[in-house]
Image (cartoon, rainbow, N blue to C red):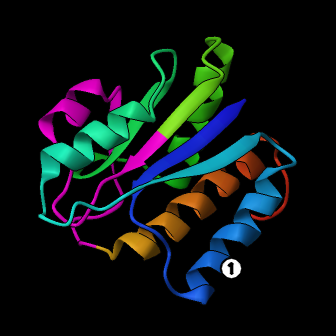
Amino acid sequence: MNVRIVCVGKLKERYWREACAEYAKRLGAYCRFSIVERRESRSDDIEEEGRAILEAISDRTYVITCEIGGRRMSSEQLAAKIEALALEGKSDITFVIGGSNGLSEAVRRQSDLALSFSDMTFPHQLMRVILTEQIYRSFKIIRHEKYHK
């Protein structure tokens, strides 16, 4: 399975980079995992960021956008969704984290599933770590391996 995160911006602090790198390393046992960073718009142009995000998304991938107004899922439900996609033959999944102004309407239209982690707003760097950890947790749940409690 191919799993990628397409996101706006870079991880500036070393501790965020190290946390993501650790989960990315762990994910190597379960899937081909990658993170694609798109440049933040200097003028807060959400459409510009949206075009950059869409350029990084292939037509054959299942797109899951992270949105405050999206569907909430437990860790077990996210794992079940990933497992169901694999069983349906959808072996390419792209998660999208937008910039500080959110996602463009064009990106939202491309989404197959809008996913919400909370009504709260998280810094994008932290959201990337949380999402990477939840993807890792999902694979551990799917394989019935010890980690998730």
Please tell me which residue is depicted at 14% across the width and 43% down the height of the picture: 47
The quadrant of the image that shows the C terminus is: bottom right
Task: Give whichever of 140, 107 is nearer the camera.
Answer: 107
Q: Residue furthest front?
A: 42
Please tell me which residue is depicted at 31% across the width and 74% down the height of the picture: 122
Direction from residue 128 to residue 15 in the image, left or right: right
Please tell me which residue is depicted at 51% across the width and 23% down the height of the picture: 61
Q: Mark 1 points at which residue?
A: 18
Task: Give whichever of 52, 31 is nearer the camera.
Answer: 52
**36 is within the stretch colored magenta:** no
Residue 132 screen position, x and y as percent: 59, 59
The quadrant of the image that shows the N terminus is: top right
Quadrant in the rendering for residue 91:
top right
Badge 1 amino acid: Glu
Quadrant in the rendering for residue 9:
bottom left
Give the magenta range.
Answer: 95-121
